[in-house]
Amino acid sequence: MLQQEPEVLSHFSKKPWTIPWPERQKVCLETYKPCLMYNHEDHSLIPFREPIEGLGKSHYQFSVLIMRSLKNMLASRLYENPQWNLRKVQANTRQIPSLYREYADEFLGNTHYLTFTPVKIWFDLWFTSQPYRVQKANEMGLKNTDSVINYMAAYRKKGSTFDTVKAFGGHAQDMDVLYRYKKMANNKVYQRFIKKYPDLLVLSDKIHEKALSEIH
């Protein structure tokens, strides 16, 4: 996601992939950017290389790692892709078991792959705790206002995996995001996955405990 001057937003917001890379890179490097966020989702942290060459240098740089409880993350992935069987869950490009374990180890401080100042955010606590949101904003030198806490992005013209903008636009805090797993309680693939990877549940619980303990 890019937050830049209006001319840069208009340059990139619709179909950036249709713009030749040299031109895109030139705009990124030469344009003043109050804030630039580069999404590195569903990829291994090993080895992790920050995209400085193509985006330009920054005065402040952070590596933000956002994680969610295993049960709810898995529920969203399966609900969005009901055709998956257990093999596809394990072997698809997202590589859920290995990536979740890798991200969890980094979150818990067992590994140190993130090169810039790390900011680790546990989504479940961020959603429910205003002090936690303030704390994480402070870690990045920002001020949390909760001014758009109920904003819901129209992802794929819909909203989230489970809910629509039409139903929850303007009151996103009412979404049942912490209990998505209940919708998959009778899903056999979900049940087999949880049973096969109990270590991931343990890691998920450890992260939750760590996040709770760090609230000032």
Image (spheres, grey):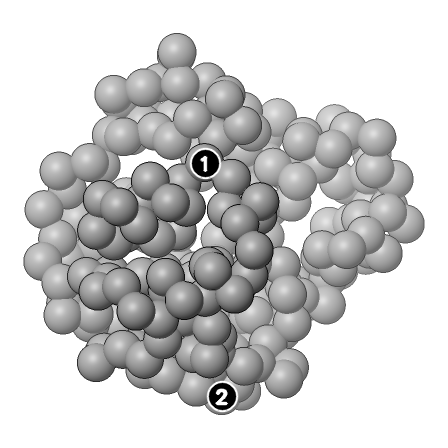
- Residue at 21%, 51% in the rendered image: 5
- Image coordinates for residue 103, horizontal then vertical, percent: 56, 70
Residue density around tag 1, few if under 14, some if 14–19, many if 20 or more, within 10 Å? few
- Give the farthest residue toward the top: 166
Residue 14, numbered circle: 1
Rendered-image quadrant of the C terminus: bottom left
**Quarter of the rendering containing residue 91:** bottom right
Q: Going by the image, does 82 lie left or right of 17? A: right
Q: Is residue 204 in view from this perspective?
A: no
In depth, the one of 14 and 45 nearer the eye is 14
| Amino acid beneath label 1 | Lys
Q: Going by the image, does 23 lie left or right of 143? A: right
Residue density around tag 2, few if under 14, some if 14–19, many if 20 or more, within 10 Å? few
Under circle 1, the secondary element is loop
- Residue at 15%, 58% in the rendered image: 134
Under circle 2, the secondary element is loop
- Image coordinates for residue 183, horizontal then vertical, percent: 61, 26
User: What residue did someone put label 2 on?
Assistant: 112
Of circles 2 and 1, which is in front?
1
- Disc nearer the start of the sequence (2/1): 1
- Image coordinates for residue 56, horizontal then vertical, percent: 36, 75
**Quarter of the rendering containing residue 169:** top left
Q: Going by the image, does 147 lie left or right of 110? A: left
Q: Is residue 36 above or below residue 189?
A: below
